[in-house]
Amino acid sequence: MRRLAGRQLLGRPHAFAAVAVAGVLALTGCGGSDSDGSGSGPDGEADLSVGSAYMPQPVSDMAAGFLVISNKGGTADRLTSVSSDAADRVTVHETVDGAMQEVDALGIPAHGSLVLESGGNHLMFEQLTRKPKQGQKVSVELRFAHSDPVTVEIPVKPATYTPKHGH
Ligand code: CU
């Protein structure tokens, strides 16, 4: 279920080099890369839309959010930051080998999609300003490296909710 995209951010194994630079390479995979693979090609700009969004009703002072960002355009983009009316701080996390970690950005490929799903990439709502309840909606603004911001109203689902996957 875990997508492999995150792995591409990790440094390739440099067994000997890593020793030489005091082993810091292992932690440099969290999105510090500047290569976003984008650039305005002849195929036009990124054309983003957001679907399948939901938030499981939080059971603590943090909440997770899931959604799919589709890109019909011919240029890649990146999800760079998120804010919400329900939390003072929203971060973007990826999950690698079962452990989640904050990343600076997640890529949205041209003619492809960025999937945030349970067990994988997700939004992390920290410092909740209110406790979202099942049936309510949470407003979220997604900001990108190139495209205009997109605001989505994310429905709050039961804490145990898992979407039916079409694949
Ligand atoms: Cu997380």
Image (spheres, grey):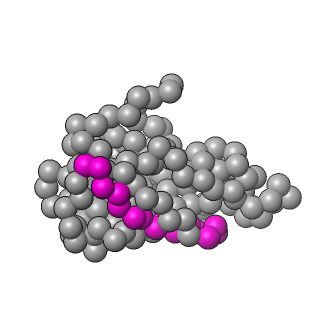
- The residue shown at (19%, 61%) is 131
Of the pair 136 and 96, the residue shown nearer to us: 136
Q: Is residue 14 left or right of residue 112?
A: left
Question: Residue 44, relative to residue 97: is it above or below?
Answer: below
**Residue 138 vs residue 44, the one in the foreground:** 138
Question: Which residue is outermost to the right?
Answer: 42
Front one among 77 and 61:
61
Name which quarter of the figure residue 88 lies in: bottom left
Residue extending farthest front: 135
- For this orientation, the residue located farthest to the bottom is 88
Q: Is residue 87 above or below residue 74?
A: below
For residue 96, side relative to residue 47 (left or right)? left
Which image quarter: residue 24? bottom left
Taking 111 as reference, is 27 left or right?
left
Q: Which residue corresponds to the image point at 75% horizontal and 61% vertical from the top-left?
A: 45
Numbered disc total: 0
Would residue 103 be seen by someone viewing this image from the given angle? no
Whole-percent x and y of residue 59? 14, 51
In the rendered image, residue 60 lying in the magenta stretch gets the answer: no
Residue 99 image point, x, y percent: 26, 46
> Bounds of the magenta span?
134-148
Relative horizontal placement of residue 148, taking residue 120 as reference (left or right): right
Residue at the outermost top position: 167
Give the residue at x 56% y 69%: 149
Q: Which x, y percent locates residue 53?
A: 43, 48
Q: Nearer the viewer, residue 167 or 105?
A: 167
